[in-house]
Amino acid sequence: MLPQELRVQQMLAKSFDFDAFEERLKARVSHELPKTDFEHTISVVKNMKRLVTMEGGKRDILVAVAYLHELGRGDNTVVLGAKLEERTLMYARCTSCATKAREVLCELNFPQEKVVQVKQLLETNSCIELKRAHHACQ
């Protein structure tokens, strides 16, 4: 990356308005998910915000993960007509979710270094905060 491009990217990252981004993300996710999944997602987002307020954490990353965690849910992965074992199916779902999340975040101009972090958390299904926020909805 050229020094000029790097400075522009750093300047944009500093001036990033997460609240405005969140509104665009919420609208986009509402069109991607069925109504019941979207309502569930909003509950998870509220719980995530509560967790971040009480315990700290990278709010923008964790809230983005909460909004995007259901994107791969509808994907039914089948190999030669046989159902994959549960762990493989979960991996396929996480990979699909992470790929879709990356597309949405890039389309909405989320800072690239944060896109990578969100994608990694979704891909590996390793976001403990998401699991806690998700569990609080049940």
Image (cartoon, rainbow, N blue to C red):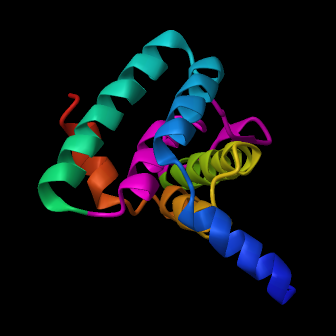
Which residue is painted at 65% across and 74% down in the image? 10
Rendering quarter of residue 41: top left
Q: Position of residue 83 (x, y in %)?
A: 62, 39
Q: In the drawing, does residue 67 fall left or right of residue 127?
A: right
Instruction: Tell me residue 70's x, y (percent).
Output: 51, 35
Q: For the N terminus, give its image quadrant.
A: bottom right
Residue at the outermost right position = 2
Q: Give left or right: position of 113 versus 3.
A: left
In the image, 113 versus 85, the foreground residue is 113
For this rendering, which residue is in front, 104 or 3? 3
Indicate the quadrant containing the C terminus: top left, top right, bottom left or bottom right.
top left
Magenta residue check for 83: yes
Q: Is residue 76 magenta?
A: yes
Q: Compare residues 45 and 111 and report the one nearer the observer.
A: 111
Relative image position of residue 71 (x, y in whole percent): 59, 36
| Rendering coords of residue 127 (x, y %) | 37, 59
Which residues lie in the magenta part?
57-86
Identify which residue is drawn at 40% across, 63% down. Answer: 126
Task: Using residue 108 as the reference point, say whether residue 137 is left or right of it.
Answer: left
